[in-house]
Structures are given as structure tokens and as C-alpha cells.
Image (cartoon, grey):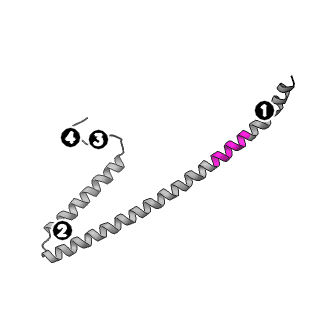
Amino acid sequence: MRFGRYESSDKNNVGTAVTFFLIGLGAGALAALVLAPKTGKQFRRDLKRGYEDAKETLQDWTEEAKDRVRDAKERVRDVAERGVDLAEDLRDSAREKVEPLRRVINRG
């Protein structure tokens, strides 16, 4: 471990960067709301709007993630089905090639 420099344990720099960016974005937005010269009523209204916007954005991201998972699941299922079909074809082909040898062995 080095001091003074953050290193991700799994070497995923993009995920780490996005995480720190979102943390900084949230902290900056909160600081801007708290330090802005507004009345309490305006501040609460803006805070509520920000919360609702963040909630909607998170819901949109969640739906997009669910769609991507469904697509990936369908792709995996298709690949698995093709693998099963290929295995069955290979098994049938092997049986066709082995059957004459089996007959010869059983005769002798």
C-alpha cells in the first residue's frame, strides 16, 4: 500500500472515478443548497425538488439497469440453447461414427 495515493484493490479505475465523482457531486450540491442565500421556505422547496429529481434519475437508472440485465439474460439463454443444440449434434454425430465399430466388436 502506498501512502498519499488511492489505489483500487480490483484495478477498476472507471468505477472508482465514477463513485468519487458522484460523491463529490452530491456533496457540492448539498453545500450549494446550504450556503445559498435563500429563505427557509425556498430552501425546503429547492431541497424537495432536488430530492425528487435525484429520485427520478435513480429510478431511470434502475429501469435501464433492469432492461440491460433482461437483455443479458436473454442472450445467455440463447447462447446456452445453442450450446445444447451443438452438444446434441455432436453426440448424434459421434453415435453415427461409433455404431459401425460397435457392431464389428459385438460380432467378433
- Mark 1 belongs to which amino acid? Val
Q: Residue at label 4?
A: 4
Asked if the residue under mark 4 is in contact with the one under mark 1, i.e. CB atoms within 8 Å, the reply is: no
Quadrant for the C terminus in the image: top right
Residues at badges 3 and 1 in contact (C-beta under 8 Å)? no
Check residue 7 in the rendering and tell me which mark sits there, or answer none.
3
Prevailing secondary structure class for the magenta stretch in the rendered image: helix
The label nearer to you, 1 versus 4, is 1
Q: Can you identify the residue that label 2 sits on?
A: 33
The amino acid type of the residue labelled 2 equals: Leu
- Find disc 1 in the rendering and name its residue: 98
Q: CA distance from mark 2 to mark 1?
A: 77 Å
Q: Quadrant of residue 53?
A: bottom left
> Image check: 108 left or right of 27?
right
For the residues labelled 3 and 1, the Cα–Cα distance comes to 57 Å
* Residue 88, horizontal then vertical, whole percent: 70, 43
Q: What stretch of residues is rendered in magenta?
A: 82-91
Kindly indicate the quadrant of the structure image that contains residue 99: top right
Disc 4 marks which amino acid? Gly
Point out the tag, 3 or 2, that comes first from the N-terminus. 3
Q: CA distance from mark 1 to mark 4?
A: 67 Å
Helix, strand or loop at disc 2?
helix
